[in-house]
Image (tube, helix red, strand yellow):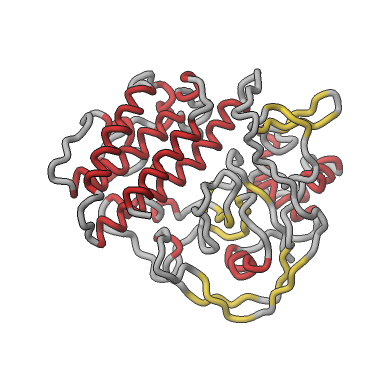
């Protein structure tokens, strides 16, 4: 595929994700972590405009100079911006304004991509595509939160099942021998800067489960008093459970003694054969402790991952999100992409059913704070 074809394919996919939405669904921000869908559509457009068109396309004219304030996410280098909690308070730019902004930038990008690109611009172009793909996953998780916290529990798309049943719910452990292993990205393709600094680690003998934890297994934890026994929890996690009155994964509802969960198809009985999802790191840790097991480190996960199927859930690991040896931030605003978040977060490995096709990688490092659970997170056990 040409660069232009790749660009169009990625850009179209974001809009296809939004096709089932009503106009009002595009605008709301029920919690700080969830951005309004229209903001994602504008912000991903702003990314191409700010990092490619403005600096490198001589004839380009900025669409609307005020949009920089609205669609800059967290780049201090780029200047002031709407505070994150206010993204849902903006009735303007309207949804149709933002689609017009997308079209304007898309035409400029397609013209620009006819030129020979320098290595620097190529790298920014692929970063822009991968950035938009990350926001496609966020679009799905944020749409789920918006609709799933509406008392009417509207379906997103009747045929959109992101609840694949596990091939097996039996706990089978894969053994890996102790030794020195190499971690991190090696290759010619795209990777994020946080995957670089390929380096050696020493791993002890360990075993890791071939499947994710199912809803059936997680229900046993709930019914065994998992949420009411401090012994399984970190102190932070126990405070989080009690302060927030957590009794089950996000989106689960106990109705007349039966567990239901909000899915993209609306409220459904919990599918016991599907992998548990929408759980925090605290819950993943507590469940593993209840099983008398643990979570894998991100290094164990990366070495073992060729031996199991992954990609259903972002899998919480026991690893803190830290730079690899030799990690360096790129100069300028792009250096703010990953590096400044390397504190107080846990690494998640794999991908989820909301991850766009082709975006996942065995060396991919996702990261979130331990209490967050609106992403399609899951659990794989280790020993
Ligand atoms: Fe972004």
Q: Position of residue 366 (x, y in %)?
A: 52, 53
Res. 229 visible in picture: no
Image point 48% across, 41% down: which residue?
Answer: 136
Q: Quadrant of the N terminus?
A: bottom left
Q: Position of residue 280 (x, y in %)?
A: 64, 44
Residue ranking furthest to the left = 59
59 relative position to 365: left or right: left
- Please, is residue 32 above or below residue 281 in the view? above
Judge by depth and name the residue closer to the eye, 20 or 375.
20
Quarter-wise, where is residue 104 in the image? top left
Q: Residue furthest bottom?
A: 179
Q: Which image quadrant is residue 219 in?
A: top right
Depth check: give the residue in front, 202 or 245: 202
Which residue appears at 41% of the width and 21% of the height? 89
Query: Who's the residue at 24% across and 28% down the image?
Result: 66
Report if residue 1 is visible in the image: yes
Residue 205 to residue 321: above or below: below
**Which quadrant of the render holds ligand 1?**
top left
Q: State the quadrant of the C terminus.
A: bottom right
Q: Quadrant of residue 62?
A: top left
- Report the residue at 60% width, 51% height from top: 314
**Viewer-side residue, 360 vs 141:** 360
Q: How many badges with numbers are in the image? A: 0
Residue 66 vs residue 225: left or right? left
Name the one closer to the observer, 354 or 379.
Answer: 354
Residue 74 at x, y percent in the picture: 36, 41
Residue 292 screen position, x and y as percent: 80, 59
Along the horizontal axis of the image, is 235 left or right of 143? right
Identify whether 61 is placed above or below 20. below
């Amino acid at each position: 595929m040409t660069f232009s074809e790749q660009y169009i394919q990625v850009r179209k996919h974001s809009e296809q994700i939004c096709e089932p939405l009503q106009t009002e669904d595009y605008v709301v921000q029920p919690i700080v972590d969830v951005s309004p869908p229209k903001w994602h559509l504008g912000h991903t457009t702003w990314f191409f405009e700010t990092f490619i068109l403005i600096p490198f396309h001589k004839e380009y004219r900025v669409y609307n100079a005020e949009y920089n304030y609205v669609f800059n996410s967290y780049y201090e280098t780029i200047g002031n911006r709407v505070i994150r909690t206010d993204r849902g308070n903006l009735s303007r730019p309207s949804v149709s304004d933002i689609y017009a902004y997308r079209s304007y930038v898309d035409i400029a990008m397609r013209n620009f991509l006819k030129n020979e690109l320098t290595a620097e611009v190529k790298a920014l172009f692929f970063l822009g595509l991968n950035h938009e793909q990350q926001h496609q996953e966020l679009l799905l998780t944020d749409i789920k939160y918006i609709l799933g916290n509406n008392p009417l529990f509207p379906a997103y798309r009747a045929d959109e099942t992101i609840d694949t049943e596990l091939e097996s719910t039996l706990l089978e452990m894969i053994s890996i021998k102790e030794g020195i292993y190499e971690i991190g990205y090696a290759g010619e393709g795209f990777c994020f800067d946080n995957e670089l600094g390929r380096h050696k680690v020493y791993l002890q003998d360990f075993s890791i489960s071939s499947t994710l934890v199912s809803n059936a297994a997680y229900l046993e934890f709930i019914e065994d008093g998992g949420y009411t026994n401090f012994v399984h929890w970190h102190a932070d996690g126990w405070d989080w459970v009690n302060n927030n009155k957590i009794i089950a994964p996000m989106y689960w509802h106990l109705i007349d003694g039966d567990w239901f969960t909000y899915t993209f198809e609306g409220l459904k009985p919990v599918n016991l054969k599907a992998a548990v999802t929408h759980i925090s790191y605290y819950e993943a840790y507590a469940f593993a402790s209840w099983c008398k097991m643990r979570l894998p480190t991100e290094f164990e996960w990366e070495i073992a991952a060729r031996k199991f199927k992954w990609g259903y859930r972002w899998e919480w690991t026991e690893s803190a999100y830290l730079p690899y040896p030799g990690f360096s931030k790129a100069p300028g605003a792009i250096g703010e992409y990953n590096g400044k978040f390397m504190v107080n977060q846990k690494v998640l490995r794999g991908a989820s059913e909301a991850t766009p096709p082709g975006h996942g990688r065995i060396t991919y490092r996702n990261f979130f704070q331990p209490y967050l659970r609106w992403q399609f997170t899951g659990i794989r056990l280790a020993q």
